Image: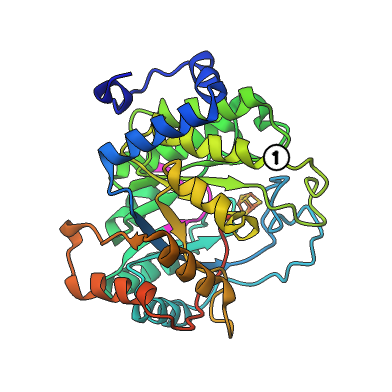
Amino acid sequence: MSNQQSSAVRHDWTPEEVTALYQQPFNDLMFQAQTVHRQNFDANEVQISTLLSIKTGACPEDCKYCPQSGHYNTGLEKEKLMEIQRVIEEAKAAQEKGASRFCMGAAWRSPTVKQMPYVVDMIKQVKELGMETCMTLGMLDGDQAKELADAGLDYYNHNLDTSPEYYEDIITTRTYQNRLDTLQNVRDSGMKVCCGGIVGMGETLRDRAGLMVELANLPHHPESVPINMLVKVEGTPMDQVEDLDPFDFIRSIAVARIMMPASHVRLSAGREEMNEQMQSMCFLAGANSIFYGCKLLTTGNPEADADRDLFQKLGIRPEQRNQEHGDKAEQAALMDAVKQQRTDAFFYDASQAS
Ligand code: SF4
């Protein structure tokens, strides 16, 4: 395969083709993914975002993997929508420690008329800090997407989760088409799209290929593609599902990289359960985005230190913020946050929200 062919942006993938991509010898797949990666990105840079849950638990949706669903008893403490002032404090704390993008997640089916002004205000105030903003709030209609875009929201996260064929085994309270409609509304509003899925939910290889086909055959590739490994949470219907072979996860990262060459592929939920070697293989396969650390404002955060250690071992640098948003001071702060062995503690894992 020539370099040009391997890096082409395509929207006409077939399930058969993608299944064959998955099944090629591991070393060939990794080589192809790394080749595509280097054609499009600095292979030693990883983009870093922070994530705050602004409303946790009691979600009316029934996503079988999710501890935030109100349908399952997982012992998760339910919370009301976080006060704006606290969100801003969290954003400031994250910014001081080097974060350039602040992602906010709410466990909602869709924001209500009453909730919209709060989230709009949050976006405006976080933007005023000079940060990029991302939200995940559930389904959006066209007007809601426009309202968020007008407020300055840069990214909207809404995942497809799995293949259309397997989808009904996982979620019954919203359809695949609902999700595609939200993605279209987000795209039409001018916001950037963050959209991926989850592997390890008992799906077949064909389903994993089907998810990738759906993502890559969208009219525009999502700018950000989170690939999540199922985190089995006691009390959810998926707590006993069979473990996915780690190589199948790494292959999924590689396939996403090849099919969506210019997108950031995010090593997302499940990362805490991967050892350093597996995470390294994911970076080699083309993952170039992570959520940094895993708890927000908790004291002591060994995971954040572990991330910094791994970055240092691998010679990975945090990706500098897009020049169009250029703020050299923030870029420098982001670099410092990884270089220095500080005991920062400001991250919250809400990566399964919506
Ligand atoms: S994944 Fe999102 S929509 Fe589904 S139950 Fe969890 S919070 Fe609700």
State whether residue 117 is above or below residue 233.
Answer: below
State whether residue 118 is above or below residue 153.
Answer: below
| Magenta stretch contains residue 15 | no
Q: Nearer the viewer, residue 139 or 193?
A: 193
Q: What percent of the width, then of the height, locates residue 243?
A: 75, 43
Left or right: 238 in relation to 10? right
State whether residue 55 is above or below residue 156.
Answer: below
For label 1, the crowd category at 10 Å Cα-Cα, with few meaning under 14, some 14 to 19 and many 20 or more, is some
Q: What percent of the width, then of the height, locates residue 16?
A: 53, 14
Which of the image's four quarters has the N terminus?
Answer: top left
User: In the rendered structure, which segment of residues is drawn in magenta?
Assistant: 135-144
| Magenta stretch contains residue 139 | yes
Task: Place residue 53 in its image quadrant.
Answer: bottom right
Left or right: 244 in relation to 186? right
Q: Which residue is mark 1?
A: 244
Please report the residue visible at 25 percent of the width from the left and 61 percent of the height from the top.
Answer: 321
Whether residue 110 is visible here, answered yes or no, is: no
- Residue labelled 1 has its Cβ within 8 Å of some atom of ligand 1: no
Left or right: 27 in relation to 107? left
Whether residue 338 is visible here, answered yes or no, is: yes
Task: Place residue 348 in its image quadrant.
Answer: bottom right
Q: What percent of the width, then of the height, locates residue 279?
A: 53, 53
Task: Place residue 8 in its image quadrant.
Answer: top left
Residue type beneath disc 1: Leu
Please report the residue visible at 41 percent of the width from the left and 25 percent of the height from the top.
Answer: 217
Left or right: 348 in relation to 165? left
Label 1 sits on a secondary structure element that is loop
Q: What percent of the width, then of the height, locates residue 101?
A: 35, 64
State whether residue 256 is above or below residue 126.
Answer: above
Please report the residue visible at 79 percent of the width from the left and 54 percent of the height from the top.
Answer: 72
